[in-house]
Image: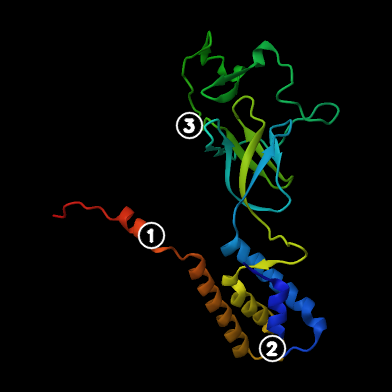
Amino acid sequence: MGYTLSDICNELMIEMGENQPNRFARYYQLGTACLREQNMDLTGIPVVAELMLNANDTVNLPANYLNYTRIALCGKDGALHSLGRNDNLCLDKTYDDCGNVPDRNSATMSGASQATTIAGIWWSSDYLDDNVRNGELMGRFFGIGGGNNANGYYRFDLNNGHILLGRLPKGTDKIVLEYLADIDSQDGDFTVHPFLVETVKNWIFWKLIARDRSRNANEKQMAMIDFQKSERISRIRFNSRTADEWLAAFRAGNQAAVKW
């Protein structure tokens, strides 16, 4: 069970002898900034989203997207199969005369540009002219490099809020994105984990005096050190493990081999 940011701000104001309720908004704003920073570095939990493909093999990034941890396809085996990153994918997607993107599934292609599925990859046959004969793979994929990913590839187009996708298995209509999301309020307030309460308080106090010209440099330095100490304690608590987990980690790294 967590605390609300409002409760923490009110508690801190009482501790500091603050008797001006109109200053609550400043405390709350500073606390929000602290939660945003800690979310990126310490407390953020990946969010899982299924994103439907657009007609031009792109997906739209969620509005609260910060950074990704995994991009994958959900296979028939119930497991996630990661896509590979390819920053050589073209950012410029083509449009028809009406300004619409072509539909990869319904577009009519001539015999020279029909698609072929090989090893789970959706290839264009004009690329495979010298590699496929009578439906059989002949090899001779020269110059494409090693480590090719049968699940497909992605590239970020952050300017337009998209992920570009390429060489996806035929029939793919969605991908799975695991990502770090921006903080989100619930019922108009932010929930704060108990491990983070003192860190938030010390951040607020430090930022309150950091730009106050009436405070001396030593006091500001001490406030920053107090915040850093509490943040370090929060990190230790979040990273703590059970005795069984520590024992399993020890056994994984300890081999009962004869030493000479």
Query: How many C-alpha atoms fall within 10 Å of the one at disc 2: few (<14), some, or many (≥20)?
Result: few
Q: Which residue position holds label 1?
A: 244
How many badges with numbers are in the image? 3
- Left or right, 251 with reference to 122: left
Q: Name the residue at 67% across, 11% down.
A: 111
Note whether 139 is above or below 13 in the view shown.
above
The one nearer the camera, 257 or 154, is: 257
Alpha-carbon span between mark 2 and mark 3: 63 Å
Alpha-carbon span between mark 1 and mark 2: 42 Å
Query: How many C-alpha atoms fall within 10 Å of the one at disc 1: few (<14), some, or many (≥20)?
Result: few
Can residue 61 be seen in the rendering of this structure? Answer: yes
Where does the image place residue 45, in percent across and percent down from the top left?
Answer: 59, 56
Where does the image place residue 21, in percent across and percent down from the top left?
Answer: 81, 83
Q: Which amino acid lies under the numbered mark 2 shown in the image of this protein?
A: Met
Alpha-carbon span between mark 3 and mark 1: 44 Å
Q: Which residue position holds label 2?
A: 16
**What kind of element bears circle 2?**
loop
**What kind of element bears circle 3?**
loop
Q: Which residue position holds label 3?
A: 145
Residue extending farthest right: 98
